């Protein structure tokens, strides 16, 4: 079945690896990062864009109930204030692995920040999954990942999707919202033999999983049982993450990167590294929770 949708360029950025588009429902603004030329970016309601260079590589972030952000960075979890700008370390759960860095992360609906780390290589499963509680207690929840990616909590709060994009497997966990625990890890998606890897992800309000299909120039929507439901094509080869935003949460924002391209490929994809918005999908997302601490 063919689906009608409209892909629009929102901001012609030059992100090496754009990631983590998050819609702030209180500000009516979209935030996202460049992980490699580290910066936080904000698309304001009037169309202007603010940029805050970061002192360390940043993998992901979440909004904070008391204002500001909690960021997952090369040096671990940090408090991040924008006005005035300040970065204050909270805890580095991998002091014994200084080359590792925090990568993909999301808040659950009890206000806990879950984030996976990644190894700097492409073959060592040295990354782990952590849960940062509102009192800043940090707990390791799972391990054995090369590049942690694909994290999203289902809208019924019963499922966590998370896995290893380079290891070519994304897992499904049973999630207990009240206790903040996970169990019964099993395969959700395996990507051997397909032209894409799973990168950043989100759920829509109908319980379907959306993820960037990096390498293949698309975003995919998957049913709760892991069946590919639809494909949204983009004008760049390496979309990196998607998330819903807009006043009705019916616009799918997609980040991208160009660090993966040769100079010739970059010349052929002048919009690589930009921010896109997909309209007309006929579904809505769910609001991103705020960190409770």
Image (cartoon, helix red, strand yellow):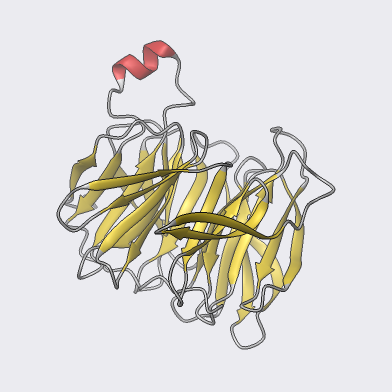
Residue 135 horizontal side relative to residue 154, left or right: right
Please, which residue is most extreme toward the right here?
96
Residue at point 40%, 66% (across, down): 208
Residue 268 horizontal side relative to residue 143, left or right: left
Residue 100 horizontal side relative to residue 32, left or right: right
Please, which residue is most extreme toward the top here?
264
Query: Is residue 57 something that shows in the picture?
Result: yes
- In the picture shown, does residue 176 fall above or below 117? below
Q: Where the C terminus falls, by quadrant?
A: bottom right
- In the picture shown, does residue 156 fall above or below 192? below
Residue 257 horizontal side relative to residue 101, left or right: left
Q: Count the marks.
A: 0
Between 97 and 141, which is closer to the camera in this rendering? 97
Query: Is residue 171 something that shows in the picture?
Result: no
Residue at point 31%, 61% (across, down): 244
Between 260 and 291, which is closer to the camera in this rendering? 291
**Residue 276 image position (x, y, % from top left):** 27, 44
**Residue 286 image position (x, y, % from top left):** 35, 73
Please, which residue is most extreme toward the bottom here?
178
- In the picture shown, does residue 292 fall above or below 254? below
Residue at point 30%, 23% (across, down): 269
**Residue 133 image position (x, y, % from top left):** 65, 75
**Residue 70 image position (x, y, % from top left):** 53, 63
Between 184 and 46, which is closer to the camera in this rendering? 46
């Amino acid at each position: 079945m063919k689906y009608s949708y409209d892909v629009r360029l929102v901001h012609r950025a030059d992100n090496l690896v754009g990631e983590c588009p998050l819609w702030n429902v209180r500000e009516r603004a979209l935030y996202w990062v460049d992980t490699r030329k580290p910066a936080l970016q904000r698309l304001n309601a009037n169309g202007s864009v603010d940029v805050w260079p970061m002192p360390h590589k940043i993998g992901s972030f979440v909004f904070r109930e008391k204002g500001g952000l909690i960021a997952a960075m090369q040096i671990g979890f940090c408090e991040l204030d924008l006005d005035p700008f300040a970065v204050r370390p909270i805890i580095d759960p991998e002091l014994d692995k200084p080359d590792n860095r925090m990568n993909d992360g999301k808040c659950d609906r009890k206000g806990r920040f879950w984030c996976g780390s990644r190894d700097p290589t492409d073959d060592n499963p040295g990354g782990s999954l952590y849960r940062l509680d509102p009192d800043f207690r940090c707990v390791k929840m799972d391990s054995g990942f090369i590049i942690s990616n694909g994290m999203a909590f289902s809208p019924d709060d019963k499922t966590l999707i998370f896995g290893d994009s380079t290891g070519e497997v994304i897992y499904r966990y049973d999630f207990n919202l009240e206790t903040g625990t996970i169990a019964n890890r099993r395969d959700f998606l395996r990507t051997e033999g397909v032209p894409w890897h799973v990168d950043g992800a989100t759920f829509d309000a109908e319980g379907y999983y959306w993820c960037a299909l990096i390498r293949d120039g698309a975003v995919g929507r998957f049913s709760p049982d892991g069946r590919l439901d639809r494909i949204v094509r983009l004008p760049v080869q390496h979309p990196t993450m998607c998330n819903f935003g807009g006043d009705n949460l019916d616009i799918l924002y997609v980040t991208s990167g160009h660090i993966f391209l040769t100079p010739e490929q970059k010349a052929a994809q002048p919009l690589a590294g930009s921010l896109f918005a997909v309209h007309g999908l006929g579904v809505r997302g769910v609001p991103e929770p705020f960190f409770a601490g």
